[in-house]
Image (tube, rainbow, N blue to C red):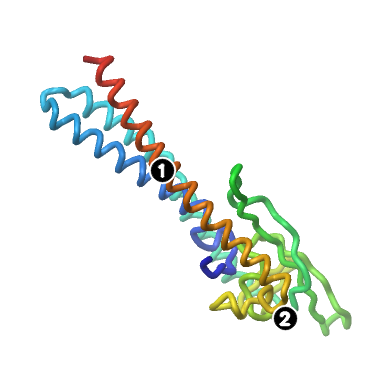
Amino acid sequence: MKRKRFYYTDQSFNYNDLIIFCAVIMMNIALMIVSFIFSQTDPSDYIVDITATTLLFIFNVPAIVHFTFKAVKMYLFRRKLMYFMANGKKFRAKIIDEQLGEPLYESEIFTVDTYHPKVKFYDSSVGKEITLTSEFPICASFRDALSSDMVTIYVIDGIFIISDFSPAYTEEYSLSRRTLKGSETEELIEKMDRKVLIIYSVAAVIVLLLMLALKITAHWVFT
């Protein structure tokens, strides 16, 4: 299993964006292959070209809109991060826990969760220890993605953003792998990842075959 990255959901492209991108690419390739096959069979049949162009438009426009909004969100979040770093109070904090957020990706096979880190730090201006929970979700659990639970945060009106942390460049150095329980969990996830890869590969082939069958049926109907 690849190393998990510790970043905010609006800070970078994430797993959900990758799935959308791969799905669109697969659909485009399938349509181009089918269109090429039919064009070689009957070059004078323009219905195939019109149908392929229409389907390409239907599949690609929502993806373009999605990635445009994603790019805007990434830009706005980076501005927010710069604002916190310029105007917020800087503290060295410890992540003590996390809360589950809205799923980043959810299906019948598996779910990718988001997390709201809970930090504890000492504020000398008020003379006491403060505990805060992040309002902004992160794509990975700190136990899987970090090698240390100590982070740098910037706080404005009780809202904070994590700006500096120690990533686990390999799974062996992550916080969860330092315990037997974490190691067993990671091994289970690795096995699940292999099953998911096989299932999605088979599903991709089925989708391509269905697209081909639909194109053949449409060709017979219109001709």
From the viewer's perspective, is 152 left or right of 50?
Answer: right
Dividing the picture into quarters, in which one does residue 154 lie? bottom right
Q: At which x and y percent is residue 86? A: 61, 76
Q: Residue visible at 19% across and 34% down?
A: 37
Please state the horizontal and vertical placement of residue 206, each as a whole percent of the image. Answer: 41, 37
| Residue 128 pos. (x, y %) | 88, 80
Secondary structure type for disc 1: helix
The reply, left or right, for residue 42 in relation to residue 48 is left
The nearer-to-camera label among 1 and 2 is 1
Query: Is residue 213 or residue 136 the one in the foreground?
Result: 213
Cβ atoms at labels 1 and 2 below 8 Å apart: no
Of callouts 1 and 2, the N-terminal one: 2
Q: Which residue is mark 1?
A: 204
Q: Which residue is mark 2?
A: 91
**Amino acid type, mark 1:** Ala
Q: Is residue 42 left or right of residue 164?
A: left
Q: Residue at x 54, y 65 (%)?
A: 79
Eyeballing the image, is 164 above or below 78? below
- From the viewer's perspective, is 167 left or right of 201? right
Residue 1 sits above or below residue 207 on the image: below
Q: Looking at the picture, how far across and down is residue 215, in whole percent?
A: 30, 26
